[in-house]
Structures are given as C-alpha cells and as structure tokens.
Amino acid sequence: MNVRRDFESVNTYLHRLDGIGSQFARYNTKDWPYLKNQEDFNNVYELPDGQRCAIENLYATGRDCAIFMSSKLREFNDVGMFPSLADYVDSFDRTWMNEQDELQDFIKGIKENTALQCIPWSVQRMIEVFEDQLRLLASVRMTVNLLKQTNLYKIEKGEAPVEKEHAINIGQIHGKVNINSTDNSTIISIDSSSIYTGISEAITKSTIEEDLKVQLLRQIDEMKYSEGTQSFLQKYKDFMQNAANHMTVISPFIPALSSLIS
C-alpha cells in the first residue's frame, strides 16, 4: 500500500489504519458470511422470537460495521474526497469509531439474552467476532487521536505555524580528475561536518517539542560519530523515524544525509 506523498510524514499511522481495514475486510468477506451460511445458524429460527431477533440484529450490526470500516480505513489516498489530512481525520468523528459505548452495551445485551439457551456455535462465534471488532475500533480511535497530535494535522487546522525550510550548505567538495592517464577515476570527498551542524541548527530553531529536540540532537551526534561504520545506517534510520512528523524541518538535509550511507 502506497501512501500519497503529502501524507508521508504520518505514513506510520496510515499504514496501521490500512492494516486494521484489511482485518475488517476479512471479517466482512469471510467470517460473517461463513458463520451465517455455512454453519448451524439456521438453528436460531427454533429459538423464541425475542432471541431470534436479537441474534439477527447481531449479524446485521456486526457485518455493517465490518463493511463500513473496511472501506473507511483505506480511503485516505482519495484526494477528491479528502484533499487534506485534517479532512480525513475529522471524518472519523461521525463513524462507528465513536459509538464504542453503545456497541459495548449492545453486545452485553446480546450475551445476556442468549445466556440461558442452547445457542448455536455460529452465534457464539459471531459474538467473539463482534468483540474483536470492538477491540479494533478502540485501536482506530487511538490512532486517529495520534494523528490529531501530528504537526501536519495541526498546521492544516491552524493550530501550529508552518515550519520554515532551511537552506543547506554541504561544505567543501574536493576532487581529483585524471584525464588521458592510467587512472581515469574521480575522487570526491564531502565535508560532512557542515551537514550535521546545519540540521542541528534547524532543529534547535524549530518549534519541535523540547524533549524531542534533545533526542534528535543526540541522534545527530550519534550519526556523526558513527559515520563510516556499519552502525551508521541504523543510527540514520532511528533519526528519520523520530523526525518523521517534522519533515518540513529536515527534508532539505535528507539528500545530503543519505549520501553518507555507504
């Protein structure tokens, strides 16, 4: 799954929503229809009317939720529907995600209604699937709340200033070119100290939270001192992961930083 480029700074959260959406899709296309059509669900029609109606409502509600969420969680790449991250995130306010309490009461009533009867196995499994979906909805709500804390969302809502991009001078480049000789190679050396200095200054002047600033500055030092060793790549990945929500600050430096990976 590819995340649209303007959402790259929050792709970790969007990948999570996509994964949860895939699970909802499996419930919709496999679990719910299988339990209703391939198992002993027909036995519910021998139960009293009140219980039968409750169980039919369990199936209808559970599958409706799975159908909707399997689509909703993977719509973020639709620019026509959601031109901004804020549009997509705010659209969850009117979905199953915020009906957690009502759905908990609903499944509690179903379980109480069916507790004293010989309930078909398919219905017992439907209750388990429904409760699994409630757990996924809780994870969706947590992820959406995390998205509301990202810098991109806050900028689009007017709650944070746009961070200025900083120009970068990668320092002196020294080279040797031998032409019409035995050695026709080009040797280029990059003064990387100015890269680390520039990105450190950009982070220090930015609006990034102080605790994260301290962590990022420490990771810059770790990259500097591990440059040329096997551990540099991991230091680079750790830094990029922690700075993912502040790409407007570090993006001018990424080409120079990535050039140091050997």
Image (spheres, grey):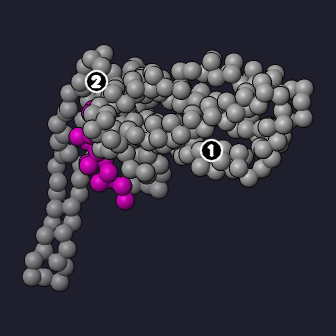
**Foreground of the two, 154 or 139:** 139
Q: Secondary structure at mark 1?
A: helix
Numbered tag placed on residue 16 in the rendering: none
Q: Residues within 10 Å of mark 1 (few under 14, many from 20)?
A: many
| Image-quadrant location for residue 160 | top left
Q: Position of residue 134 (x, y in %)?
A: 64, 29
The residue singled out by tag 1 in the image is 27
| Pair 2/1: label in front | 1
Q: Is residue 196 above or below residue 234?
A: above
Q: Is residue 173 left or right of residue 199?
A: left
Q: Position of residue 170 (x, y in %)?
A: 20, 45
* Residue 61 drawn in magenta: no
* Residue 261 drawn in magenta: yes
Q: Which residues are magenta?
A: 247-262
What residue is drawn where x is 65% and y is 48%? 33
Looking at marks 2 and 1 on the same chain, the residue that comes earlier in the sequence is marked by: 1
Numbered tag placed on residue 156 in the rendering: 2
Q: Is residue 60 above or below residue 262?
A: above
Query: At label 1, which amino acid type do we have?
Result: Tyr
**Foreground of the two, 107 or 245:** 107
Q: Position of residue 203 (x, y in %)?
A: 31, 28
Q: Secondary structure at mark 2?
A: helix
Q: Quadrant of the C terminus?
A: bottom left
**Foreground of the two, 183 or 210:** 210
What residue is drawn where x is 44% and y is 55%? 229
| Image-quadrant location for residue 130 | top right
